[in-house]
Amino acid sequence: MEPDFSDLDVECPGVQEVLAHLLNRRQFLALGVGSCLATLALSSYHANAASPQIATSANLPQGNSPMIDITPTDPNYFIPNRFDGKTLLITGAATGIGAATAIRAAREGAKVIGLDRKVKELTETISQIQAEGHAATAIVGNVVETAVCDRAVAEAVQLYSGLDLALNAAGVMDAGDPGQPLNFQGQRNLLPKSIHEATDEYWDAVLATNTTGVFKSMRAELRQMVKQGKGGAIVNIGSIAGLTGLGGNPAYVASKHGVTGLTRQAALDYAPYGIRVNSVNMAATATPMTDRAFEFMKEAQKEGANSPTASLKTQSLLMASDSQKRMATVWEQGAIILFLLSADAANLTGGTYATDGGWTAY
Ligand SMILES: NC(=O)c1ccc[n+]([C@@H]2O[C@H](COP(=O)([O-])OP(=O)(O)OC[C@H]3O[C@@H](n4cnc5c(N)ncnc54)[C@H](O)[C@@H]3O)[C@@H](O)[C@H]2O)c1
């Protein structure tokens, strides 16, 4: 789905410059209105909206370094048989990073249990895996509910004889239903706002999915792994917002810092059981969540929302250096997640891996 930019006010400072990039390249930065608006306002590119000028090695001014683009991970690449005999539970498996990781893990031999609240998209993802000849099962439900998390693990045991690996990817940026389009005007109470303007509904729902949902998912997964007595590995999806602040997103930032804490705590408590627990903490990655965040940014920009402190950082190192200003891909994220779940990561636990294109490096 391509974002609709028709409502953007092109008279606002900086908007024309950035539109030139956004329209064709889906440039999108962090998941915060502050940071997003800062991007709109502070883009250092000076392209013409009607005829964008792309910075390439051919047209950069003399004296600048050439921009050599890094090739994204091939969506078709996988390591055959790496997860043969393993069962992997993925929450948030319907779309985005969870779905891509599920698809690649199955190609690598894993039997996949996919849990999500989006029925149609989850069915499509699991059907694709099955159509490729692999074992996969869909569990429709909400990770906020203890019974759903427990049921997903019970299904793994019943259908696939146990649980070896887990990816906790379910997450939201706001309190709206992720299966429904953003309703900016109708659901203002559910959307990100700075602390003094934030509602209880926004705070409670984001924390419930992003932090309590990870707690309940891990609790069910760890109970089974401890019971089995043969170790295991878990990856939680955090965010750069679990490592730093992100303008205008208090509940998202707090919830992802909660994921960082849960990851470290579980690593500490379950190392004696041979269970490794790590997190991946990405910056902007092209998924339905970033599409939604862009819609939000566009609506908020119309109201003139901005903050000087949200403009302090707007791009990862790799996004800034890429001629297309591309976001990370789900396949790039999935590659690191599956590495962390694999035997090659045998000495890694308690890590919060900045899979962020260098966002947190400066
Ligand atoms: N895309 C990014 O730029 C980005 C950046 C940092 C962190 N993340 C994190 O990555 C994870 C995956 O998100 P994504 O970017 O792939 O977006 P996404 O929206 O495609 O995937 C999230 C999935 O989680 C599901 N989900 C949400 N709440 C749920 C709940 N309560 N119960 C069950 N399922 C639920 C959604 O239906 C969706 O399928 C999230 O935790 C997100 O916070 C994403």
Image: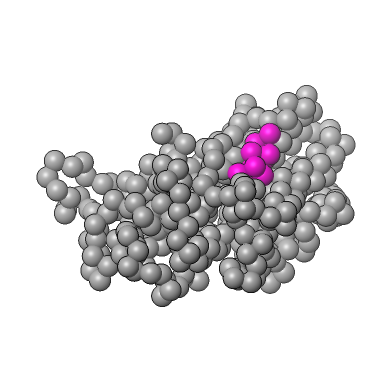
Nearest the camera: 109 or 22?
Answer: 22
Residue 147 seen in this snapshot: yes
Q: Residue furthest bottom?
A: 6
The answer to which quarter of the image holds residue 47 is bottom left
Residue 280 seen in this snapshot: no
Side of 18 relative to 66 (left or right): right
Side of 3 relative to 235 (left or right): left
- Residue drawn at x 80%, y 39% is 222
Residue 70 drawn above or below residue 24: above
- Residue drawn at x 50%, y 71% is 1
The answer to which quarter of the image holds residue 336 is top right
Q: Residue furthest left?
A: 62
Residue 128 drawn above or below residue 237: below
Side of 289 relative to 208 (left or right): left
- Residue 314, given in percent of the width and then of the height, sits at 41, 47
The answer to which quarter of the image holds residue 103 is bottom right
Q: Is residue 256 within the magenta segment?
A: yes
Nearest the camera: 42 or 23?
Answer: 42
Quarter of the image with the C terminus is top left
Side of 294 relative to 270 (left or right): left
Q: Is residue 169 within the magenta segment?
A: no
Task: Specify the principal SS of the magenta part.
Answer: helix
Q: Residue furthest front?
A: 196
- Residue 324, given in percent of the width and then of the height, sits at 33, 56
- Residue drawn at x 41%, y 70% is 8
First to last magenta residue range? 253-261
